[in-house]
Image (cartoon, grey):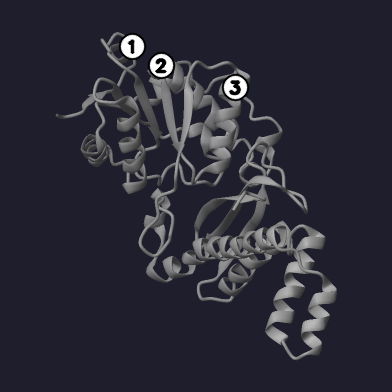
Amino acid sequence: MSATLLHTAEPLRTRTREGRRAVVMTMGALHDGHASLVRAARRVAGPEGEVVVTVFVNPLQFGAGEDLDRYPRTLEADVKIAEQAGADIVFAPAVDEVYPGGEPQVRVGAGPMGTVLEGATRPGHFDGMLTVVAKLLHLTAPDVALFGQKDAQQLALIRRMVRDLNFPVEITGVPTVREDDGLALSSRNRYLAPGERRTALALSQALFAGRDRHAAQEALRARAASAPASRARAVALSEIGESRAAADAHAVAECTELSATGGPAAVVAAARLVLDEAARLSPPLELDYVTLVDPADFTEVRPGHRGEAVLAVAARVGSTRLIDNIPLTFGASL
């Protein structure tokens, strides 16, 4: 079944629908990451529901010197990808359809969460993003909207807007899709020359290093909780030549006393080590930030943090700026 291409909202509003309507919002240049969102939307909507994919390059999200003009427009290919992934409708409005009076004077403000990390680097970006998401939610009237977890700060802000402004829609996050080498899928990957792409792999490699450090800490924490060891035992083992057992007992004892070995700071340090090495490559990676934040408000987590966290990184390789992240849980039951 072929997807219906619509350029105005009126036939979308008056369309007879059965079941749930699930919407996936994109700026086009669709790839496998977008296709995974559409497939997830198809599962959510079910056979009786309807999947709408929006394709709109939002000018409000681009600041001075950013890549609005060179952002790829590939609508014909986008329709095919959306259709193959299970979309019923592709809604590709013109700028005049979304902003009939020109740039809107009234916009959605992102608040404090919109001023940190990506918001600090791209002032006004999140105000523009939330404004167009709000507009598209009104124009498409979905029961559920799906967004990728790769844009974690964007997802957190959309969830906050929907909650704070009482939008009658469910927001669902979909895990990041990666290429075989670990690079997160992005429309901007196409801008990377071969050498730049090799350097860009440091973003995901740094996240995986932080994840591995976190997993080791959590495993040690679980051991400390189930079988505490004292420093006295570590010293005794060392005195009889059991150096490996002594080191293990010392680590467990330290974890018992501190509640975590290094905690969030050690996770960030493990990631930063990879990024520092990438800064010496040719071409080099230019780091913007690497940090652990609370997904509720994107403030940096504190030592001893327990609960959900997001390890996030942003960097530039050549003229291309890339972001990536992975979710972590501190103090989970193991």
Q: Could you say which disc has been placed on residue 13 in the image?
A: 1
Disc 3 secondary structure class: helix
Residue 241 lies, in percent from the top left, at: 75, 91
**30, above or below 258, in the image:** above
Q: Is residue 88 visible?
A: yes
In this view, the residue in front, 43 or 157, is 43
Residue at x 48%, y 69% (from the top left corner): 199
Q: Which residue is mark 2?
A: 141
Number of numbered tags placed on the structure image = 3
Residue 76 lies, in percent from the top left, at: 22, 38
Q: Which residue is mark 3?
A: 163
Separation of residues labelled 2 and 3 (CA atoms): 16 Å
Give the mark, 2 or 3, whose residue is nearer the N terminus: 2
Give the mark, 1 or 3, whose residue is nearer the N terminus: 1
Contact between labelled residues 2 and 1, with CB atoms less than 8 Å apart: yes
Residue 269 lies, in percent from the top left, at: 68, 66
Q: Is residue 318 visible?
A: no
